[in-house]
Image (tube, rainbow, N blue to C red):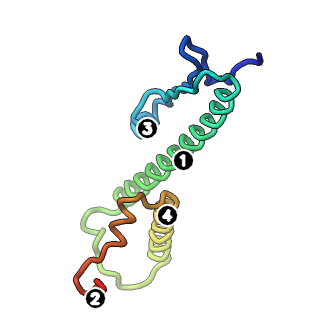
Amino acid sequence: MPALPSNCYRTSHGYIFRIVVPEFLRSAVGKREIKKSLGNDYREAVSQARLLALQVDKQFSELREQQLQQRQATESLDAYMEVKPGKRRLEPITKVTPELVAGIKSLWLAGLEADLSWRKQGLDDADYDETSRPTSPKCRKA
């Protein structure tokens, strides 16, 4: 019998898939490790372990990307707050300057990135049901 994949283990009850969640992703995943029973059949366990490894790697990379985007958004907001004192943040616009154009451009691009990540995540069933529900009596069909 060939060697088992790295995250597949033989126990007295059959095969299991086990992988440790990286420490910086544990709060997002909610677990220290991911375990799944793979049954008693060797071939089935190996194929399931490989499939689970791919799924877990994809989930971890998506979570890393989300954390990176959140960190970048926080850093850009903090940088803005440091540059502009409190009273100058809300001053009226009297003329269009290159700094103003650059600021509006970066704000718009950040909004696009946030919208794209939201669209990639998609809607779960509850959110979808909420959007399809009429909001007022005028929207209901007679």
Which secondary structure lies at badge 1?
helix
Q: Nearer the viewer, mark 2 or mark 3?
A: 2
Label 1: few (<14), some or many (≥20) within 10 Å? few
Q: Which mark is residue 47?
A: none
Which secondary structure lies at badge 4?
helix
Disc 3/disc 4 C-alpha distance (Å): 21 Å
Residue at position x 54%, y 43% in the image: 59
Q: Position of residue 8 (x, y in %)?
A: 62, 23
Query: On the image, numbered disc 4 is attached to which residue?
Result: 119
Tell me if residue 109 comes above or below residue 34 in the rendering. below
Query: What amino acid is found at the position of numbered circle 3 in the picture?
Result: Val
Residue at position x 65%, y 23% in the image: 41
State yes or no: discs 4 and 2 in contact (Cβ < 8 Å): no
Tell me if residue 139 comes above or below residue 16 in the rendering. below
Residue at position x 40%, y 56% in the image: 79
> In the picture, which quadrant includes the N terminus?
top right
Query: On the image, numbered disc 1 is attached to which residue?
Result: 62
Which secondary structure lies at badge 2?
loop
Q: Which mark is residue 142?
A: 2
Disc 3/disc 1 C-alpha distance (Å): 11 Å
Looking at the image, tell me whether mark 3 or mark 1 is earlier in sequence order: 3
- Judging depth in this view, the residue of 82 and 3 nearest the camera is 3
Dividing the picture into quadrants, the one containing residue 5 is top right
Q: Nearer the viewer, mark 4 or mark 2?
A: 2
